[in-house]
Image (spheres, grey):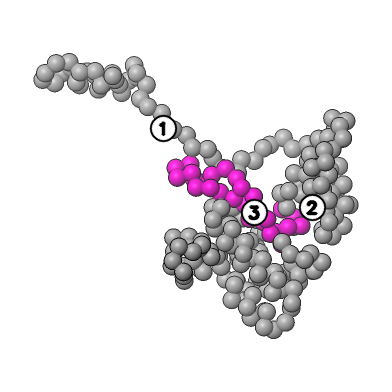
Amino acid sequence: MAGGLTKYRHLSRNSSARQALLRGLVTSLVTHEHIQTTYAKAKEAQRMAEKLITLAKRNNEETKRKVQAMLYTPHDLLPKVFGELRERYAKRPGGYTRVLRTEPRNRYDQAPSAILELLDGPRDIRFAMTAKAVARDMKNGNESTELTLKNKQKVTRYRKDGNQAFDALVKRFNEHPPTKQIRLGKPYKKKRGRIPGSRRAKKETIKAEGSSGPDLDLRQ
């Protein structure tokens, strides 16, 4: 119907190129469990990744063929999908991935960036951030806020040995506080103009004075 809502993002590609892009993103996600891309690509890849894990939980020949068609290296990743990931999300009813907005990676076009990650994995950012918040509260002698406690319940609810792993990470943060901050994106920096009085500016002024006509100062 004309004027209707778009069912999905085209990502400035035709159907085959869009599908190839999403297959590559999902393959990288299953391999590393954590990827950074633009926000639009992350949201579309999230839909395919959710479908892939839902199919893996059914674990039959038909779903294996469908999952195989979603990955570029199925011979390497099928054992992980139908083994580790299927067991990890066996009790979780849905929502196996998370999209987190970050600073734009490209400082020229300022495209909205995001991180797409698998939940309850070794690189779960919210799990680590919540543990860090609890560790900071313990160090300062403060009680954790209601929001922090709510986030703790979320990140440990379906995680295997979630409370034990959370307490171990809190202890690790207290014993070895992180000293290096990781920047996920680079902000845009405006190109600096020519400094008045610099060597190059003086050369241009002398060149202009030697030409015919009135003296010109290009610094103005």
* Residue 102 drawn in magenta: yes
Relative vertical location of residue 43 with respect to residue 106 in this rendering, above or below: below
In the drawing, does residue 132 fall left or right of residue 118? Answer: right
Of badges 3 and 1, nearer the viewer stands 3
Residue 138 falls in image quadrant: top right
Where's residue 53, x and y in %? 70, 69
Residue 122 falls in image quadrant: bottom right
Which stretch appears magenta? 96-123
Residue 181 falls in image quadrant: top right
State the separation of the CA atoms marked 1 and 2.
Answer: 42 Å
Closer to the camera, 113 or 219? 113
Residue located at (79% from left, 64% from top): 92
Instruction: Identify the secondary structure beneath mark 1.
Output: loop
- Disc 2 residue type? Val
Residue located at (59% from left, 76% from top): 69
Decide if residue 173 is in sight here. Answer: no
Closer to the camera, 100 or 183? 100
Where's residue 66, x and y in %? 63, 78
Where's residue 49, x and y in %? 64, 65
Residue located at (53% from left, 65% from top): 7
**Residue 155, numbered label:** 2
Where's residue 182, x and y in %? 64, 41
- Disc 3 residue type? Val
N-terminal label among 1 and 2: 2
Instruction: Identify the secondary structure beneath mark 3.
Output: strand
Q: Which residue is tagged 1?
A: 191
Of badges 1 and 2, nearer the viewer stands 2
- Disc 1 residue type? Lys
Pointer 1 with pointer 2, Cβ within 8 A: no
**Residue 99, numbered label:** 3
